[in-house]
Image (cartoon, helix red, strand yellow):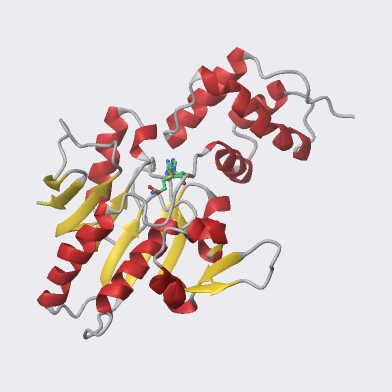
Amino acid sequence: MLDTKNNLSDSDFNKLAAFIYTNYGIKLPITKKIMLESRLKPRLRINNMESYRDYCQFILSGKCGEEEIVNMIDLVSTNKTDFYRESAHFDFMKDVILPEHYNHKSEKPFKVWSSASSSGEEAYTIAIVISEFLEGKRPFDFSILGTDISTRILEKAATAIYPLERVDVIPLSQKKKYLLRGKDVEKPTVRIVPELRTKARFQRLNLMDNSYDVPNDFDLIFCRNVLIYFDRETQEKVINKLCNHLKKGGYFFLGHSESISGYDVPLKQIKPTMFQKI
Ligand SMILES: C[S@@+](CC[C@H](N)C(=O)[O-])C[C@H]1O[C@@H](n2cnc3c(N)ncnc32)[C@H](O)[C@@H]1O
């Protein structure tokens, strides 16, 4: 019988928190100890470990392999998101960015990167906004890349099935066009229509990596509500790395509580949390 009751000691918590912070940028203050303990408990069982100390040593020894690290990071990342979250960005897309691209008559597809995509609500909102903009117009091609550190959440994003209450915020006329109702009456769900699902692709990417294996000609990058987990130095590095993948004149969005103030980055501010590459 495994004994997972013994607690996670402060010292083991600190070691794990330092490992997670150094490699993934996610800050875990000591106030998160109980949360970490309860989330890791199933991992102890799955790995046949008798104590948090064993699990901690397993992770820090470097012998556990990438798969266990991925599972652990899945448990500690905060994935809160919504359709049309911080809607000013989608208004700006509709009113400024998309008309600009349209009037430019570019042959190239309009490319957007949702760089901390969580379960895909941000990426599919982008797809809906572009589709709405194109209604009755000469179409242009577009694609959306969603990336995140959490594989569990990326699977959800690719499946694109959401509980019915998550889509309350989507206007009825858009729901009719872009959502399909699930058959289960007990657990009502909706799924994004295939026409929009094919526009979005999801892949795992750690923003802490030295370089990113994604195209370097994005028209628009969303980097919202992820930098808050990183310290200032890491934030500046991450923004610079993201900008390497943004076209000159391309747009960059941050979350409402994030800023580039004091950073040496190739962006000029257009509106609060909205920037353009210089
Ligand atoms: C709070 S959600 C934000 C989702 C969405 N951008 C929004 O604003 O609604 C933050 C996301 O960042 C991801 N994340 C955390 N650290 C990361 C890292 N080092 N690299 C990539 N994604 C990371 C988490 O897994 C989580 O899904």
Q: Position of residue 152 (x, y in %)?
A: 58, 51
Q: Is residue 50 above or below residue 253?
A: above
Residue 52 lies in quadrant = top right
Q: Residue at x 46, y 72 (%)?
A: 197
Which picture quadrant has residue 89? bottom left
**Residue at 13 percent of width and 45 percent of height:** 266
With respect to residue 172, does 157 lie above or below?
above
Give percent across and percent down for residue 193: 48, 75
Count of numbered circles in the view: 0
Residue 98 vertical position relative to residue 152 in the rendered view, above or below: below
Q: Quadrant of residue 9?
A: top right
On the question of residue 199 being in view, the answer is no
Left or right of residue 162: residue 110 = left
Q: Is residue 40 visible?
A: yes
Location of residue 4 in the rendering, given as x and y in whole percent from the top left corner:
78, 26
- Is 212 on the left-hand or right-hand side of 32? left
In the rendered view, would you say 14 is above or below 109? Answer: above
Pick the quarter of the image with the N terminus.
top right
The picture quadrant for ligand 1 comes to top left
Image spot of residue 207 (x, y percent): 38, 44
Query: What residue appears at the point 22 percent right and 52 percent down from the top-left corner?
Result: 252
Residue sticking out furthest to the right: 1
